[in-house]
Amino acid sequence: MIELTVPAGALTDAGRADVQRELATLLLRWEGAPDTEFFRAQAWSYLHEVPSGAQATAEDDAPRFRVDVTVPQGALSDRRKAGLVREATAVVLKAAGLPEADALRVWVLIHEQADGTWGAGGQIVRYADLVKLAKDA
């Protein structure tokens, strides 16, 4: 699951149209999930646009962007986390029409969900189950 929170109007029209699929796709790639219909359907992406003026810093009102990524604990090595953060930042900057120099305006927060605390379809989903599904794909 990947969620992008942005101030309303901070994304370009083209960026707004593409950013969710781009973020979902890169999340699957960094998790090492196979590119199958099943796994693509599990890569949920949310876009939360907060009203103008609802986000600010102590310094200025320039838009800031928060990417929240929720993955099963153990799904991302440190190398994969670093790659995900780097690419998610680039995707958001592109979607907002901003240069790389504005990278500190994008924060990526990775939330690892402990095994046994993730449920879908009315049952607990374990990381080992997902790994097996990926291997069998």
Image (spheres, rainbow, N blue to C red):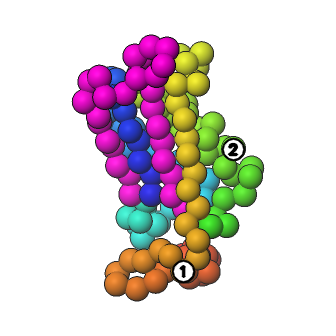
Residue at x 34%, y 23% (from the top left corner): 10
Total label count?
2
Residue 97, image x, y percentages: 42, 19
Which picture quadrant has residue 108?
top right
- Residue at 29% from the left image edge and 34% from the top image edge: 50
Quadrant where the N terminus is found in the figure: bottom left
* Residue 122 rendering spot, x and y as whole percentages: 34, 84
The magenta-colored residue range is 44-71
Q: Residues within 10 Å of mark 1 (few under 14, many from 20)?
A: few
Q: Are marks 2 and 1 in contact (CB under 8 Å)?
A: no
Helix, strand or loop under label 1: loop
Is residue 133 among the parts visible in the rendering? no
Question: Is 74 on the left or on the right of 65, as rendered?
Answer: right
Three-letter residue code for mark 2: Ala
Q: Is residue 56 visible?
A: yes
Which quadrant of the figure has residue 84?
top right
Q: Nearer the viewer, mark 2 or mark 1?
A: 1
Q: Which residue is mark 2?
A: 82
Outermost residue toward the left in this view:
51
Q: Label 1 is placed on what type of residue?
A: Gly
Gap in angstroms between the C-alphas marked 2 and 1: 25 Å
Q: What is the quadrant of the C terminus in the image?
A: bottom right
The magenta stretch spans residue 73? no
At horizontal 59% and vertical 16% (from top left) the residue drawn is 101
Mark sitting earlier along the chain (2/1): 2
How many residues crowd around disc 2 within 10 Å: few (fewer than 14), some, or many (20 or more)?
few
Q: Which residue is mark 1?
A: 116
Lateral position of residue 76 relative to residue 71, left or right = right
Residue 102 x, y percent position in the rendering: 55, 18
